[in-house]
Structure formats: C-alpha cells, structure tokens
Amino acid sequence: MISANNVTLRIGKKALFEDVNIKFTEGNCYGLIGANGAGKSTFLKILSGKLETSKGDVSMTPGQRLSVLEQDHFKYDEFPVLDTVIMGNQRLYDIMKEKDAIYAKEDFSDEDGIRASELEGEFAEMNGWEAESDAATLLNGLGIETELHYNLMKDLNGNEKVKVLLARALFGNPDILLLDEPTNHLDLDAISWLEEFLINFDNTVIVVSHDRYFLNKVCTHIADIDYGKIQLYAGNYDFWYESSQLLIRQMKEANRKKEEKIKELQEFISRFSANASKSKQATSRKRALEKIQLDEIKPSSRKYPYIDFRPNREIGNEVLMVENLSKTIDGVKVLDNLTFTLGHDDKVAFVGGNELAKTTFFQILTGEIEPDEGTYKWGVTTTQAYFPKDNTREFDNELTIVDWLTGYSEIKDATYVRGFLGRMLFAGDDGVKKMKVLSGGERVRCMLSKMMISGANVLIFDEPTNHLDMESITALNNGMMKFPGVILFSSRDHQIVQTTANRIMEILPNGKLIDKITTYDEYLESDEMARKRQIYTTEGKPEDN
C-alpha cells in the first residue's frame, strides 16, 4: 500500500495540490486522470520520492518494492537489453554483479566463499535463477525479438527502447508499480499484451494514460485530479465519466430546488414582513433562508475542442485504386505488391506493428515519395487532407497561427479563420502566437484545424493522437465517427480504431497486406486472421487450402 497524507505542492504562489489525502491499496489498478497541466506526472513523482512536497508526506508499507517506468530513453544506452530489464529489481541485479565479481577472482579467499554463499542464498530467495528467462518473457511479450536481448540499448530504435524500459518496470513482480503513459509508442499488439499483464497483476498499479480503452480494460479505480484535489471513484474510466456527470447533474438539480425554495421564502418575507399577524412566520422564514446554502459547482478544468470535418464536395463512387504497389527502404521491402480498391463508404484502419510501412504508404498516397513499382489513382471527385506523423516542417517558420492557417483557407478572412482556431481552443491572443514556439499538443490542434478548414472528403491520419490529452482525443474520435467521407488512418488508440473503422488493413513485417471488411475487435478475434498472419510472417505468402 502507498498513500499520500495531507500532500500540498506549491510552485511559486500556485498550489498544484492542496491537502491531498488518498490511499492506493494492494490488488487494485488506479487510473490517474486529469486535464493537461493538472499534475498527473508530478503526482507520480511525488509518490516515487523524486519530488518533495511543500507539506505532507507519502507513506508506503515497510519492505515493499516500488517500480517506476523510466522516461529517460538514453539512461541505459551502455547496458545490454537483458541487463537493463533485470535492473528493474536493483537488489537482484547488484547480487548478480557481486557474485560474478567474486567468482572472477583468481585469489578466491575463505571470506569470498562465505560472502558468495550468502549471496547465493539471497539470490535463490529472489528467484534469481529465473531472472533471465523472466526478463526474456517480458521482452518477447512486448515485441522485442530474442536476437536483440543481448544488444546494447543504444543499438535499439526509440520504440524498442520504450518497450525495454516498460519491461524493466514490470520485472520482478514489484509491490507498487507507477506507470506514466506506458502505451505511448507501443503498437496495438504490445498494448494488448500489456493490458493482459496488468489485468493479471496482483499488486498495486497507478497509471497515467490518455488511452480510454486501456483505462477501461485495466483499471479498478479512477483517481481524478481537478483543481488541486484528487477524487477517487470505484470502477473504470467509463464508470468514472458516468458517475462524475451524474454527480454534477444531481448537484445542479439540488441547487435548482434550493433556488426555488429561496425564491418562495423571499416572496413570503417581502409580502408579510410588515404584517403584525405574520411577523413571526416571516422571521422564521428568514432564519430558514439563512440556512440554505447552494452547492459550489466548480467548472471542470477540462476543455473539449470541437472537431467537425465537413467536406465541401460529396465523394463519388471511385475513390482510390492501388495496383501492385511496392517500396523498398534501406534494403528492406516495406510494401510488397499492395493491391486494393476503396469505396465511398470506407473508413480504413491500418494496424499492426509495421509503422514504417504505414507511414511510407501514406507518404506515397499524398505524393511525398514515389513507389518503386505499381500505381495508385485517386478518383476525380476526391480531395485529400493529410495528418503526418512528423509535422516539423509545418512549424519551422516565423508565421503566426492565424497567418499560417489563412494560407490554407479558401476564404482569406481572419475572423473566419479564427473561428476554426477557436474550436481548437486557441482563443484571443493565442492566434498571434508564433508557429515555432507551439507545444506538441498545440501543434496537433493546429494540424486538425488545417484539416477542418480544407473541406476535404478524404482524410488521412498517421497517429493523430500523439501529444493530445484525453479531451482532445475524445473530440477527435467523435469528429472521425461523424465524418461522411473516406478515412485512411493509423492509431494506437484502440477505441478510435474500433469505433471509426469498418475495414481493417494490416501491413505485415514482410510488406504483404491483409485486407478485411470488419471491425477491429472482430479482426482480433478472427482465427482466420491469426492463421493468415502466421503464414504471411513465416512464408511470405498465404497457404493454399
């Protein structure tokens, strides 16, 4: 168990947390939620001891081990992958290294023998003999192939490092597990594996995540940060949302009844206060009026943008034809003979772990790069808007937000353009912010504004939820579901994929394509798809029945 006792944290004059009291108990998974800037990551740092409080303290059951998902992706660059994972249990790792040092001595003394015996006993108690196999199991589950386990961390790419650091946090059955955005940079297969791991994890988990499906799947409780307080709810994210909305509705209804009672009492007092026969009743009602207190209903610190993609032109029957399209990058064939046709009702999710292939395919469709072989053809009625995974080029300029967006608008009117920015929470002076100083989340909201103002009837998204908070992700999800045109997209957000897509395409590691008209959940449950994926992966082609 870990608890915060009267915790207050002040940054300058601002109190980020004020007298927070909360207890996290064994066997539960707590989702820590709140608007951007509410202090979710900061609170995890307080719990882990990395940040001191202004007042109050954090207590933990004596003898328990706390594990934290590291955010520094370069910290372990000089260590082998397997060692990095085992270092998640630092005491076990230290024992292993001390044992190795003793056994490597040429002049092995009696004292060394006694010390080695002590270490061996403690090593066995900590299941040290299973450490390497347990670490390998975690790595394989997250998609780190066995041949990488003995590489140095610096030899891995960014997404692989994230998975290793996650395995490090999970290693050795920690008593308390703190996870800050564990699904970031994970593909949907790795997220699914992590969900199952946490569902079966018996100890205490506190997790910050913007993935609603993930929170619904793993959480037993939600800890909601709003206005410096933390309110605990039993249940998952959807249950929290319904409960919090119900509480607000109940408070508003209670206030409405109180306001009616206040009006009734005030009318009686005003009418009869000068009437001698009614003076006692009027005085009694004054006392009753003084006792009525309206509930304070603070507006939430959460802000939801309004995302609405409206095509300027209805899309025709011919949307996109792809024939025998292939592309090789750095000697690896990432797209191998892709062939398919899109109809006007298709909303296609590109899934699977081959992220380079998905990005490459979108770049080909938008004309950024050329295929090595094959062709693609857009229908004459189509217009495309593209959300790239890397949007750096858009923001490397001296333009203000309004001037930048006006450049993409058919209507060159600042008021019209500011309307789109206002929907995306850029109010007032925000419009004159320079593009180059925007945060990651602000950049994403700018790109979504650009797509809305384009009036395109085909939308292409490459991981649009990166850097977005929960409220913006929810708004984007709603906008994608309502869009009447065609969508091609990749996303790590399970709920967006499930609620938006009616067709699933998976580009396998060998560049081959699986294409099925279905929902994402049905696709995952399909034995046929599992069989095809295995055949494609091992042989490079489907097996004939």
Image (cartoon, rainbow, N blue to C red):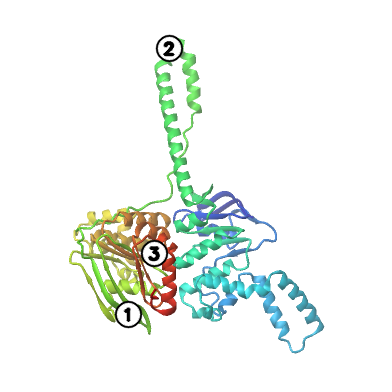
First of labels 2, 1 by sequence position = 2
Residue that lies at the very extreme toward the top in this rendered image: 277
Q: Which residue is mark 2?
A: 275
Residue occupying image coordinates x 60% and y 77%: 83
- Report the residue marked by disc 1: 327
* In the image: residue 210, left or right of residue 365: right
Q: Quadrant of residue 342?
A: bottom left
Q: Along the line of sight, which residue is nearer the eye, 402 or 375? A: 375
Q: Is residue 138 above or below residue 303?
A: below
What residue is disc 3 on?
Answer: 491
201 sits to left or right of 267 = right
Q: Which SS class for mark 2?
A: loop
Image quadrant containing the C terminus: bottom left
Q: Please report contact status of discs 3 and 1: CB closer than 8 Å, yes or no.
A: no
The quadrant of the rendering that contains the N terminus is bottom right
The image shows residue 334 at horizontal and vertical percentages of 36, 78
Specify the farthest residue to the right. 110
Task: Using the image as rendered, state which of residue 248 and residue 284 is in the foreground.
Answer: 248
Q: Are marks 2 and 1 in contact (CB under 8 Å)?
A: no
